[in-house]
Each structure stands twice: as structure tokens, then as C-alpha cells.
Amino acid sequence: MVPDPFGRAIRDHHRGERDHPLVDREGSETREHPIARFYFGEVTESTPDIRWVESWLAGPVVELGAGAGRHALYLQDSFETVATDVSRHLLEVMADRGVEDPRHVDMFSLRSTFDPDRFKSVFARGTQVCLAGSPARLRRFLADLAAVTTADATAVIDGYDPGHERASGLFGYRPDPVRGVARRVYHETYEGEVGETLSFRLVGPERLAAAAEDAGWYLADVRSGSVRTPHYQAAMTKTRDGAPDGVGGRE
């Protein structure tokens, strides 16, 4: 079985059984992963950016890397929401918290998992899309997204912009010789269990837009977190004219 210290730590936290930290490690550098803040804060209508996110979504929605289900719990009140994750521990957490349709899915195998045109929107909160690792794999992932969504689909995904002045301060940051690209590399440990090394390939909105167009998507809008962080959210559509009719969240 593939080690899953990340999922196990979040599951134990949910059960009130976690006595040790989840630790991110890169060489001699370490940090404690902020589980409570990242995965268990309730999403409400006043949560920063959620209104913008909803304005780009329509159901049915597939959420990729849904974690403990904090966004799925919110979105499913408005849309049919399929919440996916590769961690079986996290599926247990989501189901226990009331997520209606949690599924064990590898986000890089969508085409073999779901029927064509199954979803009208895609949502990925967190930078797991950066795990595509190479330009070819990113294009293939985006093409798979296109295959399992309708002709008028939308998608909202997260990224980190290597061109941001604070990008080099990201944990596990590594520069890349390719302009507009950077890496993050680290692994996680929990109670002696060591996870697989995570290798993120960071690209800014321009490179994401180029990869998206190769796969049948168009970058419609970009929302940056703040001047203090390189994080951004990108909204994509399958038409050049922006959000199609019927897209949007709560009244």
C-alpha cells in the first residue's frame, strides 16, 4: 500500500486522535502542516473568493483533490457535486462530515474514470494541478478535463506564479532554468510514516493559458490572492467569450 501520512493525519485530526504533527520536509527544512486552518475551516458566503468561484461554476461539478470536503460541503448546497480524492482516508473523512458523493479518483486518470460530458464545471482548490510535473502532462490533464466536461464547461483551478516577487519564499521552492517556471519539492511525515516525494511544477497564468488552449480551454479570468502571495485562481472556459449562460452560484 502506498504510504499516506497526509490523509491519515487529517483523518486522525477529524477523529480527535491526532497526537503528532504532520510535517513537511525538504532536506533539513521542515514545517508543521496547518491541518485545522487549511482543511476544517467552514466555507460560508463570506469566505474570501467564494463568490467569485461560484460565479464560474454550474452543476454538475467535479471537485479534484477535495481533501476533508470543506468546499464540497458548501458547493453541494447549490450544485450536484462529485468530490474526488486519491486518499481513502480522506474519503472516510468526507463521508463522515456529510459530503454526499465522495469518490476515490486519481485526478490524472479522469478520462478512464468518468463518461464523456459528465460535468459542466471543474473545481480544484489547492495547487495539486501543479503535480502534472511536465508541459506534456499538464496538456494531457487539461485535455482529460475537456473530455469529461460538456461543450460549454467551465473550470476553476489554483496555481502559484513563479514570476511573483515572493515565489522564492514558498516552502520547498526550487528555481528552474525555464523562464516562467519553478518547482516545489518536499515530502510529508506523520508518526514515522514517510510519504512519497511531491514534485510540483509551477507555472504562471501565461503558461497556463498556452497549455489550456492546446487542450481546448481558454483562460477567461485570473484572481490573485494578494500582493503578499504568489497564489492565484484561474477561471477557464471552452469558448473565447467568457462564462456561458447558466453559470453562477447562489442567488
Image (cartoon, rainbow, N blue to C red):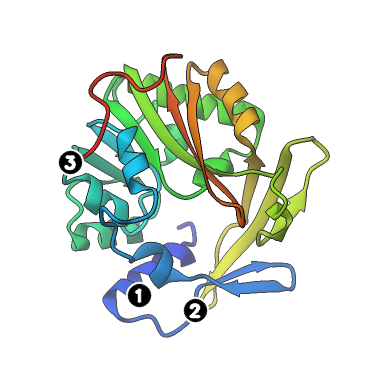
Q: Residue at x 31, y 35 (%)?
A: 55
Q: Quadrant of the C terminus?
A: top left
Return the x and y of residue 84 as percentages of the image width and height. Answer: 33, 45
Q: Residues within 10 Å of mark 2 (few under 14, many from 20)?
A: some
The residue carrying pointer 3 sits among few (fewer than 14), some (14 to 19) or many (20 or more) residues within 10 Å by Cα, namely some
Residue type at mark 2 is Pro
**Earlier-in-chain disc, 1 versus 3:** 1
User: Residue 181, position in %: x, y?
Assistant: 72, 39
The x, y position of residue 85, in whole percent, is: 37, 48
Q: Which residue is mark 3?
A: 78
Task: Identify the amino acid type marked 3.
Answer: Ser
Q: CA distance from mark 1 to mark 3?
A: 28 Å
Residue at left offset 21%, top offset 57%: 95
128 lies left or right of 71? right
Q: How many marks?
A: 3
Name the foreground residue: 168 vs 211: 168
Q: Earlier in the sequence, mark 2 or mark 3?
A: 2
Q: Residue 13, which numbered label?
A: 1
> Which numbered disc covers residue 21?
2
Q: Is residue 118 visible?
A: yes
Image spot of residue 230 (x, y percent): 62, 50
Circle 1 or circle 3, nearest the eye: 3
> Eyeballing the image, is 172 above or below 224?
below
Tag 3 secondary structure? loop
Mark 1 Cα shell of 10 Å, populated few (<14), some (14-19), many (≥20)? some
- Callout 2 touching callout 1 (CB < 8 Å): no
Question: First in sequence: mark 2 or mark 1?
Answer: 1
- Amino acid type, residue under disc 1 in the picture: His
**What separation in Å lies between label 2 and label 1 (alpha carbons)?**
10 Å
Q: Is residue 117 left or right of residue 188?
A: left
Q: Are marks 1 and 3 in contact (CB under 8 Å)?
A: no
